[in-house]
Image (cartoon, helix red, strand yellow):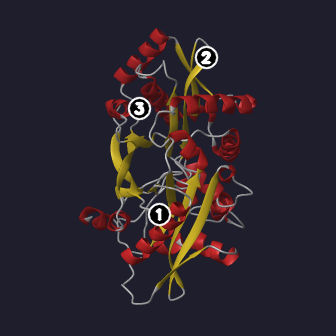
């Protein structure tokens, strides 16, 4: 905590108060607005924070607009003290997660709080009661809203506070880990972010990659934007097959992947969204996005009326990308294909003006991926921690 505190000056710290804390479910447009806007208070003096688009947050929380709610129940809570909003949290029962993992585990997410253990504890207690009433035996989080990251990645930062988050990655204050631990939560899993930069990959890596591609008969191609729907279906099949044994994985539904594809299509660079094939059969894929957070930090959550012009202006200056998902089918693993895909994206990123970037998130015990990244020069520079707690009847 001492290192974390030195990296970020936190101005959201609130002195202890004798006023009672009131926890209530979000009810009505005014409460929802307060819920959505609270981060502007928590991070107002944090230079690394990137404001989310208000429109995207509202859409994700709207059951009529986001397919996540087709298989999940979500309850939103606000914490107030003396009429002032001092915290928020979401309680989530994801039925697909429960069925797939055969585990009565609920989650919490969208957690934000002033630096006050009483506020955080009251919010978490509200979630625990809500989940227990629905038969959950474990609570895990934060997930925002699931491990498929409907809004941004899960976990709270343990280190790397001084670095701005890349697109669709979370950023949290240094004190969040302490708030969760004081409320009785313990580590569930660490998620790592790796940084990769350089003018070009080492020549030995390029030669080695070309040899493996030739020997294994592997081709790596960009997605065909003229056959976008068919390509999305291929990606969904590989994704759900490749990740099925991973910690926290929840298969994407057809409606979810269509929604994600529609949201991402305007910002996808086809050269950074690639499919690996063997004898014409798709066996792997990888997706990197230009780091639109570099542009979004200038629009303060709003595209209208003038934010869109700022976004268009600043996106021309984006010089980094994030590899946000990668999958390889069983039967084609342990051949270094995941590393080959990363290396391919790095080379294409350089050609597209994004010679540096992040690979995230990587499970702490995914040693094959971690060693592959480290062999090509990537460095782990951020750690996100997911917490859990056993619920008692």
In front here: 204 or 213?
Answer: 213
Can I make out residue 116 in this image? no
Q: Residues within 10 Å of mark 2 (few under 14, many from 20)?
A: few
Q: Quadrant of residue 266?
A: top right
Across and down, in percent, residue 341 comes to 48, 28
- Please give the name of the residue rendered at 41% of the width and 22% of the height, measured from the top-left corner: 336
The answer for how far apart the CA atoms under marks 3 and 2 are is 30 Å
How far apart are the alpha carbons under marks 2 and 1?
42 Å
Q: Is residue 141 above or below residue 222?
A: below
Residue 119 picture location, percent across and down: 43, 76
> Which numbered disc, 3 or 2, marks the residue closer to the eye?
2
Q: Residue at left 42%, top 72%?
A: 120
Q: Nearer the viewer, mark 1 or mark 3?
A: 1
Assign a secondary structure to mark 2: strand
Of the two numbered discs 2 and 1 in the rendering, the one whose residue sits closer to the viewer: 2
- Name the residue at the left extreme: 2
Q: Residue under label 2, please give it.
A: 281
Q: Is residue 172 visible?
A: yes
Outermost residue to the front:
393
Residue tagged by mark 3? 200
Q: Which one is earlier in the sequence, the residue at label 3 or at label 2?
A: 3
For label 3, the SS is loop
Measured Cα–Cα span from mark 1 to mark 3:
29 Å
Discs 3, 2 touching: Cβ within 8 Å: no
* Viewport quadrant of the C terminus: bottom left
Q: Are marks 2 and 1 in contact (CB under 8 Å)?
A: no
Q: Secondary structure at mark 1?
A: loop
* Residue topped by disc 1: 49
Query: Where residue 113 appears, x then y in whole percent?
Result: 45, 72
Residue visible at 45% across and 9% down in the picture: 215
Residue situated in front as seen by the camera: 243 or 93: 93
Left or right: where does residue 4 sit relative to residue 29? left
């Amino acid at each position: 905590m001492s290192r974390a505190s030195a990296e970020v000056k936190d101005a959201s710290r609130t002195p202890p108060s004798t006023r009672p804390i009131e926890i209530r479910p979000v009810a009505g447009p005014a409460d929802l607005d307060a819920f959505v806007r609270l981060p502007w208070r928590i991070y107002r003096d944090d230079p690394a924070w990137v404001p989310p688009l208000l429109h995207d947050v509202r859409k994700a929380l709207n059951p009529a607009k986001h397919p996540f709610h087709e298989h999940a129940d979500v309850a939103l809570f606000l914490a107030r003290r003396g009429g002032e909003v001092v915290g928020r949290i979401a309680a989530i029962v994801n039925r697909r997660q429960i069925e797939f993992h055969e585990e009565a585990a609920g989650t919490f997410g969208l957690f934000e709080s002033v630096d006050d253990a009483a506020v955080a504890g009251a919010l978490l207690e509200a979630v625990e009661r809500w989940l227990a009433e629905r038969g959950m035996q474990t609570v895990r989080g934060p997930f925002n809203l699931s491990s498929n990251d409907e809004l941004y990645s899960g976990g709270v930062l343990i280190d790397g506070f001084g670095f701005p988050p890349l697109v669709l990655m979370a950023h949290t204050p240094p004190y969040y880990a302490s708030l969760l631990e004081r409320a009785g939560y313990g580590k569930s899993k660490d998620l790592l972010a790796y940084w990769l930069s350089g003018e070009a990959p080492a020549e030995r890596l390029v030669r080695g990659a070309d040899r493996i591609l030739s020997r294994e008969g592997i081709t790596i191609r960009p997605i065909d934007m003229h056959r976008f729907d068919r390509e999305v279906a291929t990606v969904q099949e590989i994704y759900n097959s490749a990740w099925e044994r991973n910690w926290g994985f929840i298969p994407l539904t057809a409606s979810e992947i269509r929604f994600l594809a529609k949201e991402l299509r305007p910002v996808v660079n086809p050269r950074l969204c690639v499919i690996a094939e063997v004898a014409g059969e798709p066996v792997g894929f990888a997706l990197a996005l230009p780091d639109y957070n570099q542009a979004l930090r200038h629009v303060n959550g709003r595209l209208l009326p003038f934010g869109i012009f700022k976004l268009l202006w600043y996106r021309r200056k984006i010089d980094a990308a994030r590899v946000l998902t990668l999958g390889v089918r069983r039967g084609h693993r342990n051949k270094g294909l995941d590393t080959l895909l990363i290396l391919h994206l790095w080379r294409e990123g350089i050609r597209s003006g994004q010679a540096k970037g992040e690979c995230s998130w990587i499970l702490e015990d995914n040693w094959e991926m971690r060693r592959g990244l480290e062999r090509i020069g990537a460095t782990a520079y951020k750690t996100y921690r997911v917490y859990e707690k056993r619920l008692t009847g």
